Amino acid sequence: MKRRGSDGWSTLPCDLLGEICSHLSTDADRLHVHQVCAHWRAWTSPLAAFRPWIVARVSRLAAPGDDDPDHSAWFPCRLHPRKVETGRRPPAGLPYCRGASRGWLALADDAQSPTRLVLWDPASGAEVPLPCLSSVCQVFLSGDPLGPADWMAVASQRRGGRITKSFFWRPGDTAWSSLYERPTAGVFSVAFHGGRVFYMDLRSLLAVYDLNLGAPRRPPARAGMSASLGCEVERLCRCDRLVHLAHESVLVSCNGELLLVVLRSGTTCQRGGRPPPPSSRVSPPCSSFADVYKLDWTPERGVEVGDRVMDLGDHSLFLGLSESFALSAKECPAIRRNHIYCLARNWHDCFRPRNRKRKLLEDWAFVFDLGSGTLKGIPCPEELRDEEPNWWACSWLYLRSPLLKKQQQ
């Protein structure tokens, strides 16, 4: 309501305007506030970059120096991806990134035998120390460490080659505890959903654990393990004569549903095991780059692949290495609804004729429109073209709070 003798909202005191903005949690809200009028634009900070970003890591064969980080963040523009500078320095002496989860980076001081392992929030600069774990290769979070206390960290430890072992840690614990005693063939995809953690290894073997977050003294309980989903995923191909092999399957929790995203390659064979005719050996994926299905799991029946999902509503999926998530386009103006943003993982020759030489794809990521079936790429940054084999996109980083330009000054 406009007050007598004033210009109403356009003369809102600057300190009060700043206080209001501090309570806004989404990029969309802050962007709308900044665009209201000249007075509001002058006293509110515009967003420095839309989220999420791509986190890239250098390969072990090209390990950085003692003071150089082995990771960097990039704004995923389809034309010219550019490096993001948050304006905040990460904790000193922690150059190794061991995961990006819930907007936090897991940083370590040594790749094999760390003496420090810290969660760091690039937006606020907050730090949460974790117990050390040797040869830790990934850290995942079930919730925000600065939110409610009922959150848990899950980590995978490399045991040689692609063999890993899983551990968990909760606030107050003095050390990591074993989540599953037997080593697995890597942790390929992880999703926290409905108070449980679902993780799938390289053999598409699915393990499910109840987190027991409401009972601090009770460790996670194994709720079940299913046989490999590989064969069932292959049967989802809808071609009559050909089987288009699944390149990978990814778990993601979206808007109250647990989803299975099947990414297909161009490799084909005739049903019944016979080789395809020469003309079909370089055929594209049968229907699309990605198919999405509901994944149902109960302790009694185990895992069941449900209906195919054609529309994600206002949400889009971000598929990273091991951990994936969903975002609402209403809260993030930079993303498009009903899309799949997928980091490139071992996409050698998947969409190239067989007569070309084997080489890395030029794209770091792909953007797939689930509605129209169109696929576009996000190229490797120009700054890294000469070092492309040494850098690979590993994670999506979605900050806990919007990054503002004043934080970069």
Image: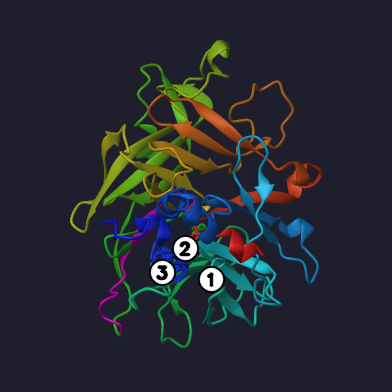
Write down the residue under mark 2.
Answer: 401
- Cα distance in 3D space between marks 1 and 2: 8 Å
The local crowd at label 2, few if under 14, some if 14 to 19, many if 20 or more residues have their Cα within 10 Å, is some
* Label 3 CA crowd tier, 10 Å (few <14, some 14–19, many 20+): few
Determine whether 107 is above or below 381 in the image.
below
Q: Which of marks 3 and 1 is nearer the N terminus?
A: 3
**Camera-nearest residue between 67 and 258:** 67
Rendering coords of residue 260 (x, y %): 36, 44
Contact between marks 3 and 2 (CB within 8 A): the answer is no
Q: Where is residue 265 in the image (x, y as percent from the top left)?
A: 52, 31
Against 409, residue 305 (above or below) is above
Task: Find numbered disc 2 in the image and state the secondary structure of the residue it sits on.
Answer: loop
In magenta, the rendered stretch is 197-216
Which three-letter amino acid code belongs to the residue tagged 2? Ser
Amino acid, disc 3: Leu
Task: Look at 72% across and 34% down and name the residue there.
Answer: 359
Specify the quadrant that holds the N terminus: bottom left
Can residue 303 be seen in this snapshot?
no
- The local secondary structure at tag 1 comes to loop
Q: Which of marks 3 and 2 is nearer the N terminus?
A: 3
Q: Distance between the Cα atoms at labels 3 and 1?
A: 21 Å
Q: Nearer the viewer, mark 3 or mark 1?
A: 3
Residue at 38% across / 36% down in the picture?
338
Q: Residue 14 carries which label?
A: none
Q: How is the image coloured?
A: rainbow
Foreground residue, 225 or 16? 16
Read off the residue under disc 3: 16
Which residue has dot 1 on it? 124
Q: Does the magenta stretch include residue 214?
A: yes
Q: Is residue 305 above or below residue 280?
A: below
* Residue at the front extreme of this rendering: 5
Quadrant assignment, res 79? top right
